[in-house]
Amino acid sequence: MQENEFYSLVQEAGHLESMDRAQAASEAVLATLGETLTGGEAEDVAAQLPDELARTLEDADHDGAGYDREAFVDRVGEHLRDTDVEPDDAEQFAEAVTDAVAAALTDGEVRDLTSQLDDDLHPLFEDVTVDPEQL
């Protein structure tokens, strides 16, 4: 998947007005996701993402934060505070970005990724409506 395809998916699913806002939402969610993973798993996920998105994930503090869904969404909102994207819609953006991430990853990598997440976050990576073969 190319970067512009990823952002287009996020823009559509997140009902964002522009590609710039899709990029800001993606960076906020990926930074938060990176915080929840160990460094090794973040590297594995990053290897299957476009370069710019991979860097965002890799640059996060990989402390295995163990956020539940509410804390994850709150943290995404914190990352959005210095952007022109509305932090109050952080949950909608988290769902849009994680759908795009799940579409970009192999099934095995999605399983590895979710194994490090709190059970509350698993639904973000399930029922993905994007077919990566149509991209």
Image: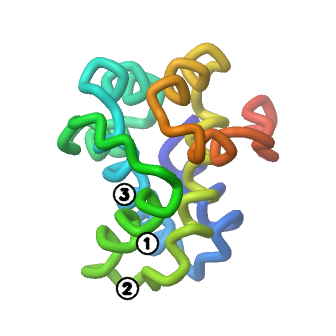
Q: Residue at x 62, y 20 (%)?
A: 106
Q: Residues within 10 Å of mark 1 (few under 14, many from 20)?
A: some
Give yes or no for contact between labels 1 and 2 (Cβ–Cβ under 8 Å): yes
Residue 56 position, x and y percent, is: 29, 46
Disc 2 designates what residue?
84
Q: Residue at x 31, y 72 (%)?
A: 78
In the displayed structure, 79 sits above or below 45; it is below
| Residue that sits furthest to the top in the current view | 108
Q: Considering depth in this image, is 46 or 37 the residue closer to the camera?
A: 37
In space, the residues marked 2 and 3 are separated at their CA atoms by 13 Å
What numbered label is drawn on residue 27?
Answer: 3
Residue 25 position, x and y percent, is: 45, 66
Work out whether mark 2 precedes mark 3 in sequence or the reverse, and give the earlier one. 3
Q: Residue at x 38, y 29 (%)?
A: 46
Q: Secondary structure at mark 2?
A: loop
Q: Secondary structure at mark 3?
A: helix
Work out whether mark 1 precedes mark 3 in sequence or the reverse, and give the earlier one. 1
Q: Considering depth in this image, is 122 or 40 the residue closer to the camera?
A: 122
Residue 93 position, x and y percent, is: 56, 66
In space, the residues marked 1 and 3 are separated at their CA atoms by 11 Å
Work out whether mark 1 precedes mark 2 in sequence or the reverse, and give the earlier one. 1
Q: Residues within 10 Å of mark 3 (few under 14, many from 20)?
A: many
Residue type marked 1: Asp
Q: Considering depth in this image, is 59 or 22 the residue closer to the camera?
A: 59
Please give left or right for residue 114 compared with residue 31 in the image. Answer: right
